Amino acid sequence: MDVDWLISDEGRAVIAALRGVDPLRAREVVPDLSAQRVAEALTQAQHRPADFPLTLVTIDGIQQATPPAVAARRAQRLAESGVRTIVDAGCGIGVDSWAFAKAGLHVIAYEVDPVTAAVARANLPEVVDVRHGDATTAELPADAALYVDPARRLQHRDAQGRPIRVHDPQRWSPPWSWVLGQAHDRPVVARIRPGHRDLPENIEWHCSSIGRSLVDATAWFPPLAAVPRRASVFQNDGWHEVAGSPESAGIGEAGAYIVDPDPAIVRSGLVGNVAHLVGGRLLDPRLAFITCDDHPPQWVGRSMRVVEQTSIKGIAASCRRLGIDSATLWARGFDTLPRTGVRHGQRAIVVAARIGDPRRSVAWVGHSA
Ligand SMILES: C[S@@+](CC[C@H](N)C(=O)[O-])C[C@H]1O[C@@H](n2cnc3c(N)ncnc32)[C@H](O)[C@@H]1O
């Protein structure tokens, strides 16, 4: 990959000219360029999001990158915690390093892959000390905190060109045992797979979502850990947060609203805390459905205003009576999704859940709140 050419005036102009162009027509747009340069410029034109803060991407790099809004928030918190120097052990194309530098931290970024390191260097000129090399064998400054977002995929792809995910944390790169070892010596924040279980007791487990999509999970080791669990939810108006130890909530009948909590809240284990926050309770201790009587804030999840309670068999009749010809189903606790007898659509919401002891199936018909 000719990084110098891609960031030159000509390279930037070609990338701009190829944005939105059918790849099969790319050679026609820039007929005098070599096939190699057209392909490299096309990758940028196709894969770099318009609002991306960095100049260059690689396909693997953008797929693994932290969403910039999440990286910025994390960096801000690190700066406010008193961290001054941070090592980014596996910086990829550099989103987290960019955010650390923007928050005023001194950043030393290691990247083992030579092409990715060259891209990171082009993306972070002057502001970050990008070093091509293996962070696990480098001598790291004693006073530096460590940020690590391990590669959780193999270097090569499968026969269909898809990334091959690595589930064993010891085979992540850097491996998880190295991360745990570093945490004895320095403050560490590690970006991890949301389902990762091999975590020490004293860490802070932090999940973040954007637009109801879980986009980030991190372990904050002591002394950076502030609470056992934290969930951050990004909505149009900014970040919202709930943090603390997981609390259990009361169980009760459905009230005026049913909330399907945001995935960051569910994955951080803070559903009970949010039930308290909205003055509500759970429909069942095993299911992440909150119910409450006052309109819940939008950020806690998608909510429905209950119109009537029914049985699974009664859903179709309820909808007919209420003049509802299509509905979206939110179901929990079933082995297979129940049949509602109502066309899928946006006119209304049907919540179906297996609740109680012994379990019984209950449904509620209502509207988006
Ligand atoms: C998940 S990506 C990092 C993405 C980055 N946080 C971002 O937001 O752009 C992990 C990167 O670590 C690099 N890497 C893996 N093992 C490494 C090691 N031992 N030393 C340095 N870099 C490493 C990989 O090549 C890959 O680019």
Image (cartoon, rainbow, N blue to C red):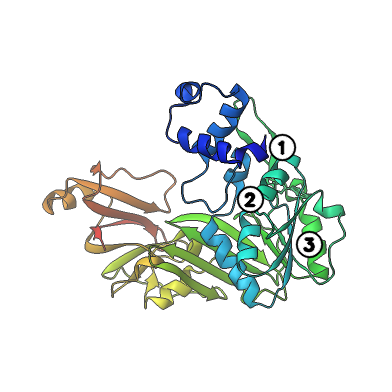
Instruction: Compute the Cα span from label 3 to label 2.
Output: 30 Å
Residue 351 in sight from this viewpoint: yes
Residue type, numbered disc 1: Gln
| Vertical side of 313 occupied by 242: above or below | below
Q: Disc 1 on helix, strand or loop?
A: strand
Instruction: Rate crowding at label 2 as few (under 14), some (14 to 19) or many (20 or more) other CA atoms within 10 Å.
Output: many
Observer-nearest residue: 127 or 300? 127
**Which of the two marks, 3 or 2, is nearer to us in this view?**
2
Residue 154 in the figure: left or right of residue 360: right
Instruction: Compute the Cα span from label 1 to label 2.
Output: 22 Å
Q: Residue at position x 80%, y 56% from top? A: 177
**Which of the two marks, 3 or 1, is nearer to us in this view?**
1
Q: Disc 3 on helix, strand or loop?
A: helix
Residue type, numbered disc 3: Leu
x then y, percent, for residue 134? 82, 49
* Marks 3 and 2 close (CB-CB < 8 Å): no
| Vertical side of 318 occupied by 284: above or below | below
The answer to which quarter of the image holds residue 197 is: bottom right
What residue does disc 3 label? 180
Observer-nearest residue: 291 or 368? 368
What residue does disc 2 label? 123
